[in-house]
Amino acid sequence: DADVTQTPRNRITKTGKRIMLECSQTKGHDRMYWYRQDPGLGLRLIYYSFDVKDINKGEISDGYSVSRQAQAKFSLSLESAIPNQTALYFCATSDNLDGIDTQYFGPGTRLTVL
Amino acid sequence: GQNIDQPTEMTATEGAIVQINCTYQTSGFNGLFWYQQHAGEAPTFLSYNVLDGLEEKGRFSSFLSRSKGYSYLLLKELQMKDSASYLCASKDSNYQLIWGAGTKLIIKP
């Protein structure tokens, strides 16, 4: 079984709809991240959480919100989706026990907003 | 501003060696990561450098020069399965990863 899972894997929605992307992990990591990836651009950080009570905005948080329901679960919401939020979304996890805080990624959610 | 530069695309031959360069400008520096990403899949961790020099891991090696803001990933004995994008990322003073757009590596028989 995959250590980091994301649901759904693909989603097509319409402008103005509310969307939730979910991420679960069995790695036991405290830190979780949401990124988006667009063609020709690097991964960009949306939100990150270092533990259940810690939520931080990343580079591009506008239009997004998150919820850390448990150590293993981190959800990303688009309150009112718009076409320029069409992208590949990745969840990642890490801990710092290895001293370098390596991030491990889920398989991604491909979101299309029409 | 923060910036990571790497070539958009490179082509190499099966069995050969290829070097993928990365230059970075970030506010602070806490390490340089390389990830591999096959099309439509998740990035997977390849290597990490925080001190100057070469780190070798099987067919893959990564080099860092902090004074030059420069790193490279060296892939030896290329195999068709090495066709992928290679992502360079620098960890800044806030311990956040700043990512390059990736280098798409095409391997030809």
Image (tube, coloured by chain):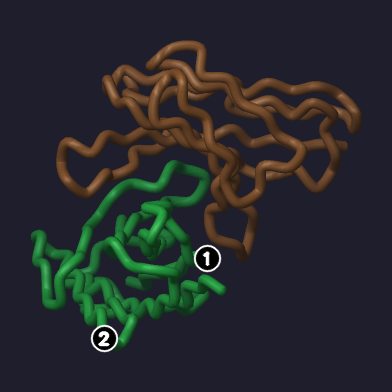
- The residue nearer to you, when weighing A60 against A82, is A60
Left-right relation of A19 to A107: right
Badge 2 crowding class, 10 Å Cα cut-off, few under 14, some 14 to 19, many 20 or more, is few
Label 1 element class: loop
Q: For the residue marked with disc 1, what is the amino acid?
A: Ala
- The residue nearer to you, when weighing A64 against A9, is A64
Which chain comes out brown in the rendered image? Answer: A
Q: For the residue marked with disc 2, what is the amino acid?
A: Ser
Tell me the chain of label 1: B
- Circles 2, 1 touching at the beta carbon (< 8 Å): no
Check the picture and name the quadrant holding the C terminus of chain B. bottom left
The image quadrant of residue A101 is top left
Q: Position of residue B83 (x, y in %)?
A: 37, 61
Which chain comes out green in the rendered image? Answer: B
Q: Residue at x 59, y 32 (%)?
A: A109
| Residue farthest to the top, as pictured | A70
In the picture of the structure, the residue carrying the numbered disc 1 is B101
Left-right relation of B63 to B71: left
Q: Residue at x 60, y 62 (%)?
A: A41
Which callout, 2 or 1, points to the residue nearer the camera? 2
Q: Position of residue A22 (x, y in %)?
A: 56, 20
Q: Residue at x 26, y 86 (%)?
A: B67
Give above or below for A48 relative to A19.
Answer: below
Label 2 element class: loop
The image quadrant of residue B48 is bottom left
Q: Position of residue A104 (x, y in %)?
A: 34, 38
| Residue farthest to the bottom, as pictured | B68
In the picture of the structure, the residue carrying the numbered disc 2 is B67
Badge 1 crowding class, 10 Å Cα cut-off, few under 14, some 14 to 19, many 20 or more, is many
- The residue nearer to you, when weighing A73 against A107, is A73
Check the picture and name the quadrant holding the N terminus of chain B. bottom right
